Amino acid sequence: MPSTSSSRLMKRGALVVLEGVDRSGKSTQCKMLKDTLNNQGHSVELFRFPERSTAIGKVIADYLAKKCELDDHAVHLLFSANRWELMPDLKKHIENGTTVIVDRYAYSGAAFTAAKPGFSLDWCKQADVGLPRPDLVLFLTLTPEQAARRGGFGDERYEQTDFQKRVAANYSKLSGEDNWKMIDADKDIDTLHTELTQLITSTIAATKSSGLGTLWTPASDCSGSPVKEKTRLGQEEALV
Ligand code: Z5A
Ligand code: MG
């Protein structure tokens, strides 16, 4: 099969998401992981959500900073749109063999909006159905007491203890998926970093030749089997 041999031999990168309660150290670890893995010879790019630099991201940033008010449904869809607008870029990296580490993802979207009155977790997941499914979700856990030792909340929207408890309960409902790994984040930065680095390097090795799945589609949710993206992207060969 000469026409497909080069794309079939292309090893894709892994998709790794860091999620977790507030102040659990996601952003700190994401930056360190990119540097460490790059230094080990892995090609790694970092994405974060919300990505506040785009036109959509700027509206989200104003909303979080309480500079504007938006309907809760509308802002939920903006957070999702902010992920979708970055997906072509993210997928290109993965197809080219670069591992992508993401600081918050659709799980934050569902857990935060579903903590608002009148929103079901199921409704909140719908806008992100079909996004690339992470190979690994590292969920950093921290009790409210441990988080409090890391300094007070800022002035952004959602930074209140009661709201955060409802968010944590929603994360707990999402955590049954087989790509999740719960990590106790109440340890020093370097110890946590070593643990996360080892988990990601194992994932990079394990996912090199397997397909990228789609998020919250029936096959991915129920069996954990990756779903190839031929119909959505027409690029199945680049992903296998
Ligand atoms: N949101 C949403 O509603 N819908 C969505 O779809 C998405 C997000 C994607 C802003 O997100 C808000 O958007 C967020 C969710 C909502 N709302 N809240 N609340 P953000 O990602 O921009 O949030 P953030 O401001 O970066 O906070 P964070 O992510 O919760 O923090 P973190 O990244 O987990 O922690 P950190 O910044 O790395 O560290 C926090 C502090 O702890 C800092 O002083 C560190 O030096 C210290 N730290 C870090 N690690 C340790 C250890 N191991 N020991 C001791 N101290 C540590
Ligand atoms: Mg952060």
Image (cartoon, rainbow, N blue to C red):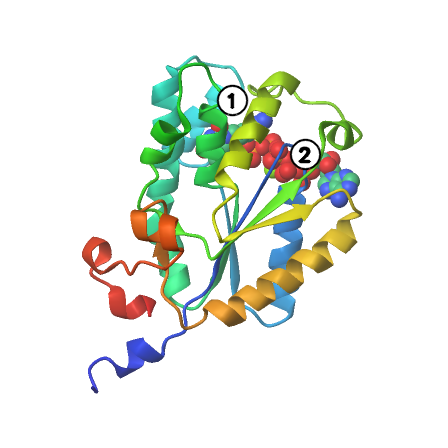
Q: In which quarter of the image is ligand 2?
A: top right
Residue wearing tag 2 = 23
- Whole-percent x and y of residue 222? 37, 50
Which tag, 1 or 2, sits closer to the chain's start? 2
Task: Residue under label 1, please give it.
Answer: 64
- Looking at the rendered structure, the secondary structure element under dot 2 is loop
Residue 61 at x, y = what percent?
Answer: 49, 26
Q: Name the one closer to the observer, 31 or 101.
A: 101
Q: In which quarter of the image is the N terminus?
A: bottom left
Residue pushed farthest front?
Answer: 222
Judged by depth in the image, the label closer to the viewer, 1 or 2, is: 2
In three-dimensional space, the C-alpha distance between marks 1 and 2, rounded to whole angstroms, equals 16 Å
Q: Which amino acid does label 1 sit on?
A: Leu
Circle 2 packing at 10 Å, graded few (<14), some (14-19), many (20+), is many
Q: Quadrant of the C terminus?
A: bottom left
Decide if residue 76 is in sight here.
yes
What type is the residue that disc 2 sits on?
Answer: Arg
Image coords of residue 9 (percent x, y):
35, 80
Q: Quarter of the image holding residue 92?
A: bottom left
Label 1: element kind:
helix
Question: Does label 2 point to a residue whose CB lies under 8 Å from ligand 1?
Answer: yes
| Residue at screen point 26% across, 65% down | 236
The residue carrying mark 1 has its beta carbon less than 8 Å from ligand 1: yes
Q: Indicate whether 13 appears above or below 113.
A: below
Residue, far bottom: 2
At a point 19% along the width and 56% down the height, the residue shown is 231
Q: Is residue 58 left or right of residue 74?
A: right
Quadrant in which residue 25 is drawn: top right
Marks 1 & 2, CB-CB < 8 Å contact: no
Residue 51 visible in rendering: no
Mark number, residue 238: none
Q: Dot 1, how many residues are within 10 Å of its Cα: few (below 14), some (14-19), or many (20+)?
A: some
